[in-house]
Image: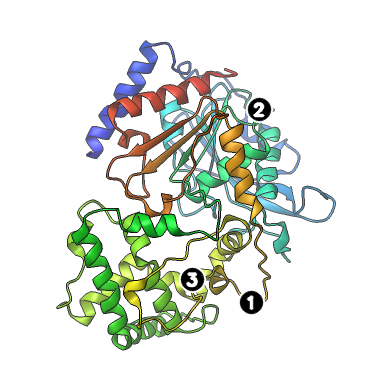
Amino acid sequence: MTNATKLLLTLFLMTLLTATGLSVPALAQPSDGDIRARIEAIPGMRVLGERPAVPGQVVLDLTYRQPTDHRHPDQGSFDQRLTLVHKSTQRPMVLYSSGYDLGPSPNRSTEPTQLLDANQITTEQRFFGTSRPEDPDWSKLTIWQAAGDHHRLITALKRIYRGAWISTGGSKGGMTAVYHRRFYPRDVAGTVAYSAPNNVDDRDDTAFDARLEEVGTAECRAAIKSAQRDALIRREAMTGRYARWAEGEKRTFQTIGSVDRAFELAVLRLPMMFWMHQPTGGCGSIPATTATDDALYAWVAKVTQLPVYTDQTLDAFTPYFYQLGTQLGYVQFAAPHLDGLLRYPGIQETRSYVPRDIPLRFQPSAMADIDRWVRDHGSSLMFINGENDIALAEHFSLGSGTYDSYLFNVPDANHHVSITGLSPNDAEQAATALRRWACQGV
């Protein structure tokens, strides 16, 4: 579906929903007073600055003081970074988190924000970016503590934004939105989670292995396996290029252990990364066995994002891998086609990504609890998944106790999905539900 088609579909949905009476009231232009002053008046909130914005919007960079431990709020705190896109206190509010730091464009509007013509508050996840205590106690990086951050923030901002709230996020951000709903189900009127994995049993990865044998065509799957084997057969040539790149960029491999270990780990993760991020037609880019070393290396580097495995990148993602190793879980792929070419048993463990001075103790009950809540008590949840996304081999499912919730698949899509990418009937149903949720409390 082209961008133009998606735009036309979005406009069609908005027109249709308005005609059926399910739209949020048209954007009014009441005087909200000095929104900056009202935000600054919230205890613990600080305005760092104001960004240039289109007419009718105010964009503020903020921090909000959060307790390091919500059970013991007197025992330390940190400033959580936020970005507010304000349109009107009469509009709905969308709470968005990527599950990581704020990123390069924290004021970009999410799809729910655009469909609802809403305000948006973008949050940086605790312990990511600068949103961490000076001497972080890693045991306080849990899904419950992060949900407490969102709950406090919503409670504070509802003094100003009294309309309906919608939460959203993609991938880890979608997971974050669902976890928040588990612990504070009434904070928002609805949640849209894009490409949100649900690894209920971290000991069993057979669903991922099975999915890798089903996705795409047999020819494409065989080509990927061949490229993996070829990369390890030519290991010396590949790691030599990797090492020279790292030296030139002043990158190191102390956490994973060596350039050779990092390259093997990248090759093992290659099929998942390919199906998560490669566009339709990406199978045609897979190098043949006759490809030069340079061509093979360039393709592997691009697909696996080789800079990820260096200390300098891992440092920013340590909170992510810590969460994988303590609560979220992570996949370890079986690779019988690579027998005789692998050197490092256990290299796929999350311990490989986290400095050894940070303890990891996995809590197997955490994700099982979330899954039970979604199936037995979840309400006003929307899951949008890509048909070809390996990360969604284990995904959230609706149960007998789930109420007013939806599970949609975007045809022939990867990890990057949208409501407008759905079939027209599904897109209409999704947008209708979102608008209805946003009318609650308006």
- Crowdedness near tag 3: few (<14), some (14–19) or many (≥20) residues, C-alpha within 10 Å: some
Q: Amino acid at mark 3?
A: Gln
- The residue under the point 44% across, 31% down is 55
- Residues at marks 2 and 1, CA–CA distance in whole angstroms: 45 Å
Q: Which residue is mark 3?
A: 348
Mark 3 or mark 2: which comes first in sequence? 2
Dot 1: what SS? loop
Residue plotted at (31% across, 58% down): 213
Please state which of residues 89 and 57 is positioned toward the viewer in this rendering.
89
Asked whether the viewer can see residue 239, the reply is: yes
CA gap, disc 3 and disc 2: 46 Å
- What's the residue type where badge 1 is placed? Arg
Task: Choose the circle earlier in sequence order: 3 or 1.
Answer: 3
Disc number placed over residue 215 in the picture, else none = none
Please report contact status of discs 3 and 1: CB closer than 8 Å, yes or no. no
Residue 11 in percent (x, y) is at: 31, 25
Q: Secondary structure at mark 3?
A: loop
Q: Give how far apart the Cα atoms at labels 3 and 1 are.
A: 15 Å
Tell me if residue 327 comes above or below residue 424 in the rendering.
below
Where is residue 254? Give x, y as percent.
54, 82
Task: Compare marks 2 and 1 and give the one earlier in the sequence.
Answer: 2
Q: Is residue 122 visible?
A: no
Mark 1, other Cα within 10 Å: few <14 / some 14–19 / many ≥20: few
Q: Which mark is residue 160?
A: 2
Q: Amino acid at mark 2?
A: Ile
Please tell me which residue lies in front, 403 or 48.
403
Q: Secondary structure at mark 2?
A: loop
| Numbered circle sitting on residue 356 | 1
> In this rendering, which labeled residue sits more in front, label 3 or label 1?
3
In the rendered image, residue 95, in percent from the top left (x then y), is placed at 56, 37
Quadrant of the snapshot with the C terminus: top right
Quadrant in which the N terminus is drawn: top left
